[in-house]
Structures are given as structure tokens and as C-alpha cells.
């Protein structure tokens, strides 16, 4: 597993300028729902509602699909915030965020791509990579290794509670030069097409999953494009 040297990180971060916010219709695709029975919940808890939707009230929830090695390159999260969680858990940095999002190419908790829909303290969609070569457990890497790749501001007042229904679709594709193309579709509009440099993306491979922080969320997770 390779990662760009520390000295190269400024140029990697500069590539965030390659993010291209565009508003075009999303491409329809076949989605496979992921039930709670096939999720490996590593933090917090997930309940199944009568409608088949999933729900979490944990201050910190983490889960990935048990996909038997058939990793999905695309994932769709449909969600609604029902309010803050009863308890608040700061992140390792000490910051308190209310957010939910997708985990992509999650070989382990230390090496993966996150696309998070943040609702507090700011409203935005953030693409980040977590890379810790040689480390594979949360005990080893903790909250180290995060690199923010792109940020798309979302309309609205972060002081107000956003309880609308939302859709977050993320598609990933590895190019011939090793770069990873991440396409983000929010509520039906393509808002970001971002290239992740090869030095940061190389070796990232694993299942899709879901993460939330400090919110009571009702959600459905679906995946597509297995083995790509």
C-alpha cells in the first residue's frame, strides 16, 4: 500500500481545486438495498423499522456491508434527521459535528474514503480520505490520517434543524493513471466530480458503509456496481 510523502500533501490538497460543481440530472441505476442483517456495526447501534428502513440514535455509529468480497463502487444513502442524539460525543479532534454519510472502499477503519453530509456546525458535503499505511484497526490509527479533498457548501442555516428527506449518492471509479474519480449526487443533482490523486487513492479497496455522528437518523443504504 502506497501513500504520497508528507511533502507532497500540499500539492494533493491543491487538487481540491479540480472539484467541479455541476448541476445535471443523476443517471438512473439499479440499486441493491443493504439490510441491517448484512451490516457489520462496529460502533453504536442500528435498528430496523417496520417499513424496512433503518434507524440509529447513537452519538457515534459506524457500519460496513458484509459483502463477501464483492465490493460496491457506488452507494446511495436516503436519510432524514429526526433530531439530535440524546448524548453528544465529540470527535477525536474535540469538535462536535452532526452528520451522516457514506464510507467507500473501506478496507479497514484506517484506510477509506468518506463522503459526509454535515448539518452542524456548518452545512456542507465533504469528501475526505483516511490513510494510515500499515495500520488496520481503530486502536492503531485513531483519528489520524484524514485528508480533506473537497467541500461543497449546502444552503441553509446550520443553527436550524434540517429534518427534510435527502439523498446522497456517491460513485467511485479508478482511472488508468491510478487516480480515483469520486462523483457526488445530492438530492438528484451532481454537485461534485473530484479526482483523488493516485498517491492517496492507491490500494483503497473494500466494502461500502455508513457513518453518523450526534444525530437520530432514519435511513436506507443501497449499493451498486459490485466488483468495479
Image (cartoon, helix red, strand yellow):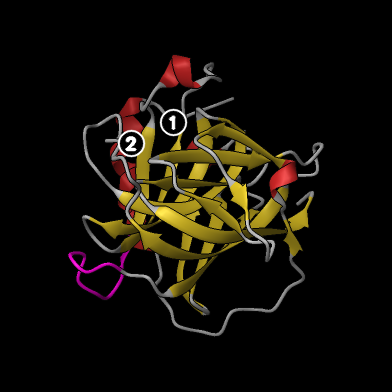
Q: Mark 1 touching mark 2, by CB under 8 A?
A: yes
Pointer 1: what residue?
4
**Residue 178 at x, y percent in the picture:** 60, 45
Query: Left or right: where does residue 153 sit relative to residue 186?
Result: left
Residue 89's tag is none
Task: Check if residue 158 falls in the magenta segment.
Answer: yes
* Secondary structure mostly taken by the magenta-highlighted segment of the chain: loop
For image coordinates 27% across by 67% down, the residue present is 161
Query: Left or right: where does residue 184 sit relative to residue 228?
Result: left
Q: Secondary structure at mark 2?
A: helix
Q: Secondary structure at mark 1?
A: loop
Specify few, some or many for label 2: CA neighbours under 10 Å numbering under 14, 14-19, or 20 or more.
some
The answer to which image quadrant residue 74 occupies is: bottom right
**Residue 22 at x, y percent in the picture:** 43, 78
Q: Earlier in the sequence, mark 1 or mark 2?
A: 1
The answer to which image quadrant residue 93 occupies is: top left
For image coordinates 56% across by 50% down, the residue present is 180
Asked whether residue 131 appears in the rendered view, the answer is: yes
Pointer 2: what residue?
9
Q: CA distance from mark 1 to mark 2?
A: 7 Å
**Residue 36 at x, y percent in the picture:** 69, 47
Q: Which residues are magenta?
A: 151-161
Specify few, some or many for label 1: CA neighbours under 10 Å numbering under 14, 14-19, or 20 or more.
some
**Residue 31 at x, y percent in the picture:** 74, 66
Amino acid at each position: 500500500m502506497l501513500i504520497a510523502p508528507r511533502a507532497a500533501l500540499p500539492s494533493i490538497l491543491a487538487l481540491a481545486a479540480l472539484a467541479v460543481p455541476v448541476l445535471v440530472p443523476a443517471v438512473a441505476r439499479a440499486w441493491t438495498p443493504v439490510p441491517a442483517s448484512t451490516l457489520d456495526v462496529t460502533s453504536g447501534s442500528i435498528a430496523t423499522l417496520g417499513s424496512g428502513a433503518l434507524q440509529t440514535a447513537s452519538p457515534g455509529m459506524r457500519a460496513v456491508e458484509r459483502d463477501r468480497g464483492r465490493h460496491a463502487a457506488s452507494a446511495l444513502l436516503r436519510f432524514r434527521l429526526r433530531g439530535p442524539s440524546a448524548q453528544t460525543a465529540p470527535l477525536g479532534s474535540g469538535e462536535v459535528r452532526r452528520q451522516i454519510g457514506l464510507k467507500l472502499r473501506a478496507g479497514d477503519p484506517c484506510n477509506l474514503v468518506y463522503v459526509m453530509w454535515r448539518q452542524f456546525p456548518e452545512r456542507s458535503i465533504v469528501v475526505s480520505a483516511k490513510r494510515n499505511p500499515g495500520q488496520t484497526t481503530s486502536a492503531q490509527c485513531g483519528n489520524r490520517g484524514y485528508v480533506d479533498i473537497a467541500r461543497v457548501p449546502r444552503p441553509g442555516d446550520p443553527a436550524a434543524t434540517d429534518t427534510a428527506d435527502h439523498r446522497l449518492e456517491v460513485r467511485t471509479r479508478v482511472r488508468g493513471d491510478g487516480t480515483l474519480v469520486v462523483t457526488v449526487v445530492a438530492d438528484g443533482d451532481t454537485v461534485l466530480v473530484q479526482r483523488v490523486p493516485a498517491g492517496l487513492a492507491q490500494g483503497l479497496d473494500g466494502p461500502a458503509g455508513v457513518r453518523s455522528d450526534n444525530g437520530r437518523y432514519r435511513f436506507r443504504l443501497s449499493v451498486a456496481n459490485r466488483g468495479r
